[in-house]
Image (cartoon, helix red, strand yellow):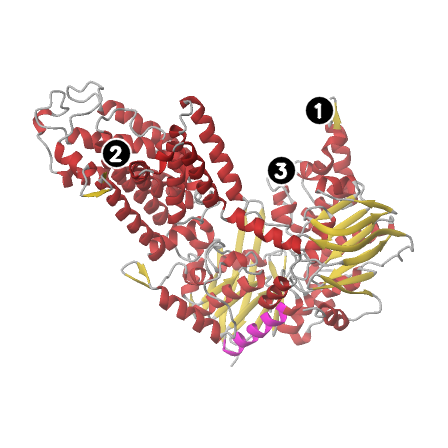
């Protein structure tokens, strides 16, 4: 039973100035889920890219079922039964599900696609996975979890022996995650070897059989999951003790900062949501996918049109008709998709920091370099942004540091209300703690924070109270110290 | 579960939501309403606009442009464009004309050539078009240049070649006319009359070509690969699609379609010069965009291209019918293209 499916031995890979992989090893057995863990930059993705031939390795060997292999492309790997479900789904969004599934190998007769066969094969495949989905639906109209299922189905259709999941749950709700785990278990029981890359400790300990931890391009340890604890994994990953996962919460004041009444979206699926936010409070927003969590923030920030409802800030009714108006009223929004709507990738750290209040640096129509430098330096220092210089393009920073720059951007506008949408998505443990710390400090300064997150432990660990949305309506507000994950889940399902 | 919520929402629709829904319906079908409104307006001014002769005129002018527009549509679906189309048509038209001048015509470019058989010249036209497409496609796919840049360059090159070609023999840069009757007859002759108005043969050629292209786009592996590459090139590549071959294929197909257009155009106009084909690509791009072929890539339908070409033609002919000053017509055309695209764009905007 303990047969070795995939073995990567002594893999080395250098980039100019960096040794990305230094004698890394990975051994995946048949019928097991093998977690691959490590901080961002530890070399997990590089190792996988070497496996799939996206990078050429400098040294080392790869064996698939005992045979030495060397894939030139991910397509070649796929054909030999090694598949990857990407963190960023790579799909032709304007095409249908079936088109995406069979892309590159359409069943055809003299160049003419056999549509009927394609449709039937698709349905058969979905049925074998216990997954119902219209093959003619356009991929772009489906949720991330559905699209991920299509990717998994694609891997299965290639008869994959090894399936690599790269951060598969980073955009899934708890419910969808359960569905994914069921599928992973089915695949495992069929004898597949699963490589599972994730930052989420709870998941890793639940689903995996073995864990390999990487640090600085080296393999630190490979152990059975049953012998590991969360603290142990963190210690292996960061190489030091991380005593706490969440910083101390300072109590919120009783003073009311923001009152929202009957907030209803014109297009956004949000119906009559009411809540209060106090000074110094971190209010969490929980809910299933499609419950309207992101939409709530977009409505408050003037990105989405309001149908009716009132928003009162410090006793004065305000109208955020556009993000510009919202910023003037003291709101700040950290968006969910950092890469798509947060950073300006090719522009410098400095420009990314000052962009939200450029007019403040204007003198006789010219921007004052000195004033900008002062503010950027203060952000870099106070938020501990690791960057070679303030002129470095932000795209070369790690996700955690990019996120800190965006937080700094908003801090410069001195906001009263911070709307944070999944601020720690795709960020490693060490940086996560620092972001939590910043959030706690902001609250301590008397600001109000609204935190949307799909990670339950994060909501419980960081927030004072949690607003639970269900199908666009407020299902209840719970005290973070007194509630349980079960209570939140049942509230989230209230109107579904 | 999702469909249940949707039905529930429809039952609970407030009056505001109903108006919203109606508004959406108008926006989604705005092009058709626009078309109807334009026709009604012009007919009130001059009922002859809907006479058989006028309709046949609009249809034939549209048919003449359609193959070219279909070729460019392919390039746009790859989220590119093709600026060389007009000059390619011009060159091919002049070459076709020069090879099919009447024997004994005083200004014949190649006096000793006689008259070549039609199919041979047609094949030459298609080959030149295909070659132009091959060069365009190769540069786009292999050198990773944006099609805008590549075709901006090839457009200049083609014009230079065209001017040099027209200096051939004893032609000395003159317009090419005196085409052999067998050629003009095959293109502009007619076997079908409606209400006394002859429908030129090339309308039927154009319809046949459109049918073939519809099949290629919708039913073949090549067509599906074209949409996939346009929609997400990287996804297509990792799925094992030969992206290079697909890009080159799309441009070659476009070039062949310019070949057809040039071959038809030479006989349709009768007298071809260096100005033949000038700016054709701009009308075709406008028609594609009006017809919903998106520059985002991966989005477009044959019927959209047809609708765009016909709509644009109705506007052009209509403006003449309204006896609007020729200079002002340019301004109006520009405004209409802006308006039509702006309304059409609303379909794709995410409502929030």
The residue beneath circle 2 is B265
The residue beneath circle 1 is A366
- Residue A268, disc: none
The residue beneath circle 3 is A347
Are the residues under badges 3 and 1 in a single subunit? yes
Give the residue at the far bottom of this rendering. A1
| Dot 3: element | loop
Residue at the (40%, 23%) spot, across then down:
B326
Residue at the (42%, 38%) spot, across then down:
B39
Spatial separation of the CA atoms under disc 3 and disc 1: 19 Å
Of callouts 3 and 1, which one flags the residue occurring earlier in the amino acid sequence? 3
Measured as percent of width and height from the top left, residue B337 is found at: 47, 35
Asked if residue A108 is positioned above or below residue B303 in the image, the reply reads below
Say which chain tag 3 marks. Answer: A
Rendered image quadrant of residue B186: top left
Q: Residues within 10 Å of mark 1 (few under 14, many from 20)?
A: few
Q: Residues within 10 Å of mark 2 (few under 14, many from 20)?
A: many
Q: Main secondary structure of the magenta part?
A: helix
Residue A188 lies within the magenta run: yes
Spatial separation of the CA atoms under disc 3 and disc 2: 49 Å
Whether tag 3 and tag 2 are in contact, CB under 8 A, the answer is no
Query: In front of the other: label 2 or label 1?
Result: 2
Measured as percent of width and height from the top left, residue B346 is found at: 55, 45
Say which chain tag 1 marks. Answer: A
- What residue span does the magenta drawing correspond to? A176-191
Whether tag 3 and tag 1 are in contact, CB under 8 A, the answer is no
| Dot 1: element | strand
Looking at the rendering, in which quadrant would you find the C terminus of chain A? Answer: bottom right
């Amino acid at each position: 039973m303990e047969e070795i499916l995939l073995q990567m031995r002594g893999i080395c890979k250098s980039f100019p100035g960096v040794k990305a992989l230094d004698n890394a090893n990975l051994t995946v057995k048949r019928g097991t889920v093998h977690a691959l863990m490590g901080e961002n930059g530890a070399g997990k993705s590089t190792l996988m890219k070497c496996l799939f031939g996206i990078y050429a390795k400098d040294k080392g060997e790869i064996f698939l079922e005992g045979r030495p292999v060397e894939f030139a492309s991910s397509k070649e790997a796929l054909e030999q039964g090694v598949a990857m479900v990407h963190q960023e789904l790579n799909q032709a969004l304007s095409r249908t599900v079936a088109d995406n599934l069979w892309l590159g190998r359409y069943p055809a007769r003299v160049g003419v696609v056999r549509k009927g066969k394609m449709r039937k094969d698709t349905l058969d495949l979905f049925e074998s996975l216990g997954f119902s989905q219209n093959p003619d639906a356009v991929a772009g109209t489906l949720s991330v979890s559905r699209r991920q299922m299509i990717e998994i189905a694609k891997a299965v259709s290639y008869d994959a022996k090894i399936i690599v999941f790269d951060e598969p749950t980073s955009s899934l709700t708890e419910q969808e995650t359960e569905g994914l785990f069921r599928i992973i278990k089915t695949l495992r029981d069929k004898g597949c070897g699963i490589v599972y890359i994730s930052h989420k400790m709870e998941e890793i300990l639940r689903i995996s059989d073995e864990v390999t931890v990487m640090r600085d391009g080296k393999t630190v340890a490979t152990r059975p999951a049953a012998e590991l604890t969360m603290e142990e994994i963190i210690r292996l990953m960061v190489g030091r003790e991380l005593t706490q996962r969440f910083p101390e919460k300072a109590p919120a004041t009783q003073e009311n900062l923001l009152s929202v009444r009957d907030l209803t979206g014109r297009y956004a699926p949000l119906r009559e949501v009411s809540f209060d936010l106090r000074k110094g409070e971190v209010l969490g927003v929980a809910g299933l996918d499609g419950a309207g969590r992101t939409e709530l923030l977009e409505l408050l920030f003037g990105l989405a049109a309001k149908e009716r409802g009132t928003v009162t800030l410090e006793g004065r009714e305000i109208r955020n008709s556009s993000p510009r108006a919202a910023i003037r009223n003291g709101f700040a929004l950290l968006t969910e998709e950092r890469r798509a709507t947060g950073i300006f990738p090719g522009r410098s750290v400095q420009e990314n920091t000052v962009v939200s209040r450029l007019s403040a640096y204007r003198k006789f129509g010219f921007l004052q370099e000195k004033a900008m430098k002062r503010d950027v330096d203060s952000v870099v220092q106070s938020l501990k942004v690791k960057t070679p210089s303030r002129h470095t393009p932000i795209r070369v920073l790690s996700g955690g540091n990019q996120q800190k720059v965006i937080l700094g951007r908003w801090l410069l506008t001195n906001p009263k209300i911070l709307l944070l949408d999944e601020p720690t998505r795709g960020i490693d443990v060490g940086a996560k703690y620092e972001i939590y710390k910043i959030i706690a400090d902001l609250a301590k300064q008397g600001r109000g924070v609204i935190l949307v997150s799909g990670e339950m432990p994060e909501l419980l660990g960081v927030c004072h109270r949690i607003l639970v949305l269900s199908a666009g309506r407020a299902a209840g507000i719970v005290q973070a110290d007194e509630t349980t994950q079960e209570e939140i889940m049942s509230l989230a399902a209230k109107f579904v | 579960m999702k469909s249940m919520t949707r039905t529930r929402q429809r039952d609970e629709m407030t009056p505001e939501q109903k108006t919203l829904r109606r508004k959406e319906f108008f926006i989604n079908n705005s092009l058709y309403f626009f078309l109807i409104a334009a026709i009604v307006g012009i007919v009130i001014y001059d009922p002859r606009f809907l006479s058989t002769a006028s309709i046949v005129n609009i249809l034939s002018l549209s048919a003449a442009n359609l193959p070219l527009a279909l070729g460019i549509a392919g390039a746009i679906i790859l989220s590119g464009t093709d600026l060389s189309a007009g000059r390619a048509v011009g060159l091919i038209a002049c070459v076709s004309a020069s090879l099919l001048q009447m024997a004994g015509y005083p200004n014949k470019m190649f006096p000793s050539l006689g008259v070549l058989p039609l199919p041979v010249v047609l094949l030459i036209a298609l080959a030149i078009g295909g070659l132009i497409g091959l060069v365009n496609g190769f540069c786009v796919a292999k050198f990773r240049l944006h099609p805008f840049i590549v075709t901006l360059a090839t457009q200049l090159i083609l014009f230079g070649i065209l001017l040099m070609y027209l200096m051939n023999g004893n032609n000395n840069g003159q317009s090419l006319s005196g085409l052999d009757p067998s050629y003009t007859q095959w293109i502009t002759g007619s076997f079908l009359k409606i209400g006394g108005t002859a429908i030129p043969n090339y309308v039927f050629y154009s319809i046949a070509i459109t049918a073939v292209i519809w099949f290629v786009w919708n039913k073949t592996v090549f067509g599906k690969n074209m949409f996939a590459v346009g929609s997400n090139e990287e996804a297509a590549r990792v799925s094992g699609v030969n992206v290079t071959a697909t890009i080159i294929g799309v441009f070659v197909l476009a070039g062949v379609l310019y070949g057809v257009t040039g071959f038809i155009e030479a006989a349709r106009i009768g007298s071809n010069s260096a100005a033949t084909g000038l700016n054709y690509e701009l009308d075709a791009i406008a028609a594609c965009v009006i017809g919903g072929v998106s520059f985002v890539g991966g989005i477009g339908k044959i019927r959209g291209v047809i609708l765009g070409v016909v709509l644009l033609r109705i506007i052009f002919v209509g403006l003449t019918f309204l006896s609007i000053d020729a200079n002002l017509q340019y301004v109006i055309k520009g405004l209409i293209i802006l308006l039509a695209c702006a309304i059409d764009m609303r379909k794709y905007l995410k409502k929030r």
